[in-house]
Image (cartoon, grey):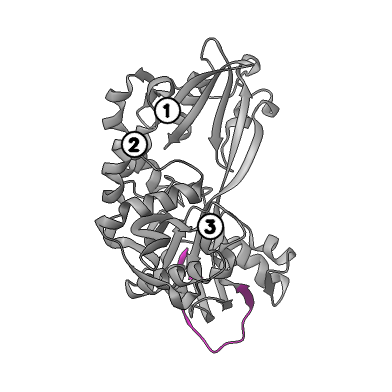
Amino acid sequence: MATASDITLRAATEADVPAARLLLATAFGGPPDVDPVRLEQGPKLFPLDRVILAVEAGRVVGHTQDRTMTLTVPGERTVEASGVAAVAVAPTHRRRGILRAMYTELHRRTEAARLPLTIFTASAGTIYGRFGYGPAVLGSQVTIDRRFAEFRPTTPDPGGVELIRLEHAIPLLPELYDRWRRVTPGAQVRPEPAWKIWLSQFRGDDGLFALIHPDGYALYNCRHTETGLTAEVAELRAVTPDAHAALWRVLLGLDLVNTVEAPIGDDDPLPYLLTDPRLARTTARYDQLWARVMDVPAALSARGYQGDLDVALGVHDPFRNAGGTFALRVRDGVADCAPTTREADIELGIDVLGSLYLGAHRARVFAAANRLRAKDHAHLRAFDTAFGADRAPALGWFF
């Protein structure tokens, strides 16, 4: 049996690509990718020089990659983050320290680049806490019986939605997405290769219909099920409440459609636009984005806050050296954070800090779970309030 000392970490080359694709297909439960768009655009999104391979006797047994992403944080600000993807270890090489070795190297590179945050979309929820990550963006899936959906008399009917061919909509999407991204914590700048890869999955019977509004868009496809025709919303981005209401009025007015399925965020007003809010039935709830704070002062100084604050944070980092005690002072939404010798008013793990960072979770809930400890209730209340956000975070694009 190979041990960690038998494994070498190195950069990838073109010659490694077939073995890496086989490993990723095995890890994520699918055949090796042969889609020409993904094969062409993938290296543009995650270049080979950002791939770390774990190799034993010339065989690829571990893989990860990353790219620098621009992430929106509370206060309509942005921070540069390392976006990690395609993390896999061969099933023949479990529990030999390979994942830990790859993450050690990833984090070393992130620290060298002075990026204050690392983010990724996780396929399993039990692995990454020990590396200091916490779920930072949540999402839900709803199903609506369109036949019974009626809007309240007070629901706006702004109009302005146009149904156009997808190929004509595609040039309009990036600008609308970017306007939405700028006001939404958790959303990332979306590069052109990411658009091409995402759109390439919708072909033939899975082709998308496009609804365009001056302040938003909705993309959906239709499929026949045992209960009739279902419209499945692939993506809906609304910059304004009027765009949101206008797009949903069209989606819930589709003739012959019995059911509409859609992903929505925690603060989506859809249920409250309807005379019967129960019709927006939640069928799934899941984490979308995980975050790890790599540099506490830089990360906490980068985001905005909902209230004034003056606390000493005791942050425990089980994996790297980002922990310590930090004085966090916030005035009028602007923060200053630096190491301090003060006694901690709030103590928490760096994974909890990652979960709180974008505003998806409340500090008081972590306190109730004994994962955050406050000196007293006043400190907890002030901390809980300050770490809120004007808008619930949402994942911009899956990576």
Would residue 121 be found to the left or right of residue 57 on screen? right
Q: Residue at x 61, y 82 (%)?
A: 344
Find disc 3 in the rendering and name its residue: 91
Find disc 1 in the rendering and name its residue: 219
**Front-most of 330 and 283?**
283
In terms of image quadrants, where is residue 285? top right
Q: Nearer the viewer, mark 2 or mark 1?
A: 2
**Mark 1: few/some/many CA within 10 Å (<14, 14-19, 20+):** many
The region drawn magenta spans 330-348
Q: Does residue 387 appear in the picture of this structure? A: no
The CA distance from mark 3 to mark 1 is: 37 Å
2 or 3: tag closer to the N-terminus: 2
Q: Residue at x 37, y 19 (%)?
A: 162
Q: Which amino acid does the dot numbered 3 rest on? A: Pro
Above or below, comparing residue 381 to residue 393 in the picture: below
- Circle on res. 316: none
Quick check: marks 2 and 1 in contact, CB under 8 Å?
Answer: no
Q: Position of residue 300 (x, y in %)?
A: 47, 69
